[in-house]
Amino acid sequence: MCFNRFTTGPCNLCPRECGVDRKNGQRGFCLVDDKIILARAALHRWEEPCISGQTGSGAVFFSGCNLRCVYCQNFEIAAGRRGIQVSVERLAEIFLELQEKGAANINLVTPDHYVTDVKTAVLLAKEKGLALPIVYNCSGYEKREVIRSLSGIVDIFLTDFKYMDSGLAEKYSAAPDYPAVAKEALAEMVSVSGGPVFDEEGMMRKGVIVRHLLLPGHKRNAKDVVRYVYETYGDGVYISLMNQYTPFERLKENPDFRELCRRVTKREYETVADFAIGLGVTNAFLQEGETAQESFIPAFDGEGVERHFREDLGRE
């Protein structure tokens, strides 16, 4: 696929189609221009077992986001407040460095607004010996044609499916079209990746994992997501039900989000998990114990990024 329409002139990479000229420093809804900004690149052991494995996933956290989730655990980088500028060449080096550290895969976290440069960096790294699966870790709010263009580049899609309720999508993420967009994107992810493939150690090599973060008080939305994904794709995708919702203090300042100012109860989570099992879902990841802790959120301190920072910028 030709990427010219994504890299020159108005940016229409994501469903927002802001049309801003990022090449000339304008910032779109994602809050970043065309410069690659990373907040962290390190081994990450808090993904699903078939992604993290024993050594950890090589997670590369990109700054900026095309959603406005009021409960976002990565809000500092989603809002573009944290990060270090790197070149495409440096990004490729980071992939290789993570491979040298024993990463199970290269895990691209919220990469969609840099997708063209990310593709270039992956190909460059592969020319230099990168042999790990590439994980596209995204919000689910993606353009179908962009996902299609990742064929041959991305092996695993680790995608959120946040809402089947457009009202909730508008209230919590400023994206009333999220359900429709996520359905289209997921269909393409399944097409691009094919069925799930695992190696002899149980690590995923290809496939799709659909995550849903249960929000307090929103069991119905969660059940609707699970039902849609399972009835549409059956065992062709894995479903990951997450109970790690963290009620940040900043939400208490806004009376519109009072319902989000508590953790998900054990009963709420078990109700949704039992619903999934009752539907017949067998390819699933369920969480146990206390996971709603801010300690599960990594420090966005530039780890793994800054080594050649001065070289990359050439003016620091």
Image: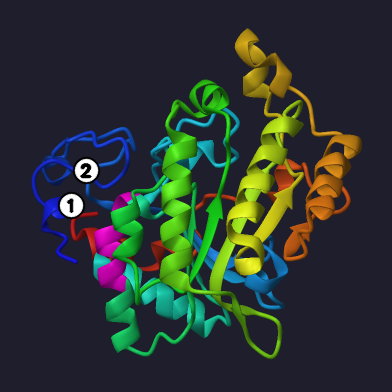
Q: Residue at x 60, y 67 (%)?
A: 236
Picture coordinates of residue 28, whole percent (x, y): 26, 34
**Region rendered in magenta:** 113-121
Q: Nearer the viewer, residue 218 or 65?
A: 218
Residue found at the very far front of the displayed protein: 231
Other-residue count near label 1 (Cα within 10 Å), few / some / many at <14 / 14–19 / ≥20: some
Circle 2 SS class: loop
Other-residue count near label 2 (Cα within 10 Å), few / some / many at <14 / 14–19 / ≥20: some
Q: Residue at x 24, y 54 (%)?
A: 316
Indicate left or right for 271 with 297 as reference.
right
Picture coordinates of residue 288, whole percent (x, y): 86, 53
User: What numbered label is drawn on residue 6?
Assistant: 1
Residue 120 colored magenta?
yes
Which three-letter amino acid code belongs to the residue tagged 2? Asn
Q: Nearer the viewer, residue 38 or 2?
A: 2
Indicate left or right for 22 with 204 as reference.
left
State which quadrant residue 174 falls in: top left
Q: Nearer the viewer, residue 167 or 139?
A: 167
The N terminus sits in image quarter: bottom left
Residues at discs 2 and 1 in contact (Cβ within 8 Å): yes
Residue 14 visible in the current orientation: yes
Picture coordinates of residue 166, whole percent (x, y): 52, 27
Indicate left or right for 2 with 302 as reference.
left
Q: Residue at x 86, y 34 (%)?
A: 265
The residue under label 2 is 12
Circle 1 SS class: helix
Residue 237 colored magenta?
no
Labels 2 and 1: the sequence-earlier one: 1
Which three-letter amino acid code belongs to the residue tagged 1? Phe
Q: Residue at x 46, y 30 (%)?
A: 68
Picture coordinates of residue 254, whole percent (x, y): 61, 12
